[in-house]
Amino acid sequence: MNGEVKRTSEEIDDHMMYISAKLYTLLSKLILKMCGYEGYVINYSKFYERNSIKTTEEYFNEI
């Protein structure tokens, strides 16, 4: 995809795990909201942050 930047397999795996966890959290929030749930949901992407990915997100999100 990006010919200038070489990434290791570990960096790619970490990034894909983070994106997958982000998607899982989003889908969980949407499904729970449709069911009428109000409360907190675990932000799984925050747990899978690595050195290359730093965010200011919280460990729990409120619906």
Image (cartoon, grey):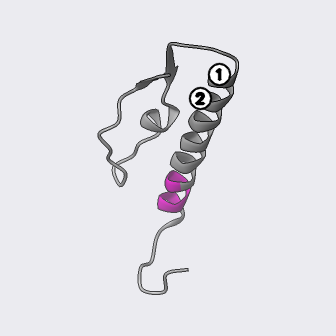
Front residue of 30/22: it is 30
Q: Magenta stretch containing residue 27, yes or no?
A: no
Q: Nearer the viewer, residue 10 or 46?
A: 46
Q: Locate residue 42, reporting x and y percent.
A: 50, 23
Depth check, front residue: 62 or 34: 34
Q: In this view, does 36 lie to the left or right of 42?
A: right
- The residue carrying pointer 1 sits among few (fewer than 14), some (14 to 19) or many (20 or more) residues within 10 Å by Cα, namely some
Q: Which amino acid does label 2 sit on?
A: Lys
Please tell me whether residue 55 is drawn above or below residue 42 in the rendered image.
Answer: below
Q: Position of residue 60 (x, y in %)?
A: 43, 23
Quick check: 20 left or right of 63? right
In the rendered image, residue 13, in percent from the top left (x then y), is placed at 56, 55
Q: Give the range drawn in magenta.
A: 10-15
The three-letter amino acid code for the residue at tag 1 is Leu
| Secondary structure state at the residue bearing disc 1 | helix
For disc 1, the marked residue is: 32
Q: Could you tell me what secondary structure mostly forms the magenta stretch?
A: helix
Q: How crowded is mark 2: few (under 14 residues within 10 Å), some or many (20 or more)?
A: many
Q: Which residue is drawn at 50% across and 55% down?
A: 15
In the image, what residue occupies the spot 42% across and 86% down?
4
At a point 56% along the width and 47% down the height, the residue shown is: 17
In the rendered view, tell whether residue 49 sits above or below residue 13: above
Q: How far apart are marks 1 and 2 (CA)?
A: 5 Å
Instruction: Relative to 39, say whether 27 is above or below.
Output: below
Is 51 on the left or on the right of 35, as rendered? left
Place of residue 49 in the rendered image (x, y in percent of width and height, measured from the top left): 41, 42
| Depicted 24 relative to depicted 2: above or below | above
Quarter placement of the N terminus: bottom right
Instruction: Find out whether the residues at labels 1 and 2 contact each other: C-beta distance under 8 Å.
Output: yes
Numbered tag placed on residue 14 in the rendering? none
Residue linked to disc 2: 29
